[in-house]
Image (cartoon, rainbow, N blue to C red):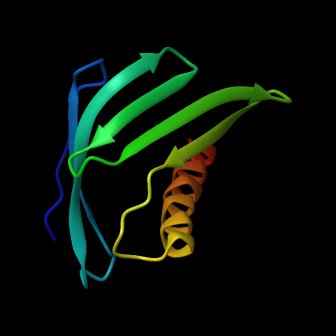
Amino acid sequence: MHQKAENDLRVKGNFSTRMEAKDGSFGFDFGGEYLDIVDHSMIYYIMSDGRKVKIDFSELEGKVQVKESFTPEEQNPYEMQKMGWQAILNNFKNYVEKS
């Protein structure tokens, strides 16, 4: 399994990572460029295929709420994509709560 991630979190900075299923059955490269960043509030980027993603961070009852909106791609159903993005956020939440 190939694992690699690079991240330059600044406007016009680039990021790239390799995402793979735990069992190695499939994987894909994921990357793009940061278009706008507001510290502790928002990250906006464009992926290498031209789709845009915006992540908003806000405080809610002493916790950080993360809201992510994305331009869907054309190959897979929107609900499937939404579930995939949500799974990533859920894994991030689990990781952070263990720290």
User: In the rendering, at what x and y percent does residue 35 appear?
Assistant: 33, 25
Residue placed furthest toward the right: 61
Report the label total: 0
Q: Residue furthest top?
A: 39
Instruction: Residue at 56% x, 41% y: name it.
Output: 99
Left or right: residue 23 versus residue 39 is: left
- Left or right of 11? Residue 29 is left
Q: Residue furthest front?
A: 74
Q: Position of residue 67 (x, y in %)?
A: 63, 41
**Residue placed at 23% from the left, 21% from the top?**
12
Q: Quadrant of residue 28?
A: bottom left
Q: Quadrant of residue 45?
A: top left
Q: Position of residue 33 (x, y in %)?
A: 24, 33
The residue located at (49%, 58%) in the rendering is 88
User: Which is nearer the eye, 36 or 18?
Assistant: 36
Q: Is residue 67 left or right of residue 72?
A: right
Residue placed furthest toward the left: 2
Instruction: Give the quadrant of the N terminus.
Output: bottom left
> 84 or 44, which is in the foreground?
44
Q: Nearer the viewer, residue 81 or 73?
A: 73
Above or below, comparing residue 39 to residue 94 in the picture: above
Residue at position x 59%, y 31% from top?
56
Query: Where is residue 55 shown, x and y percent of the image?
Result: 52, 36
Residue 62, quarter of picture: top right
Would you place residue 47 above or below residue 19 in this image? above
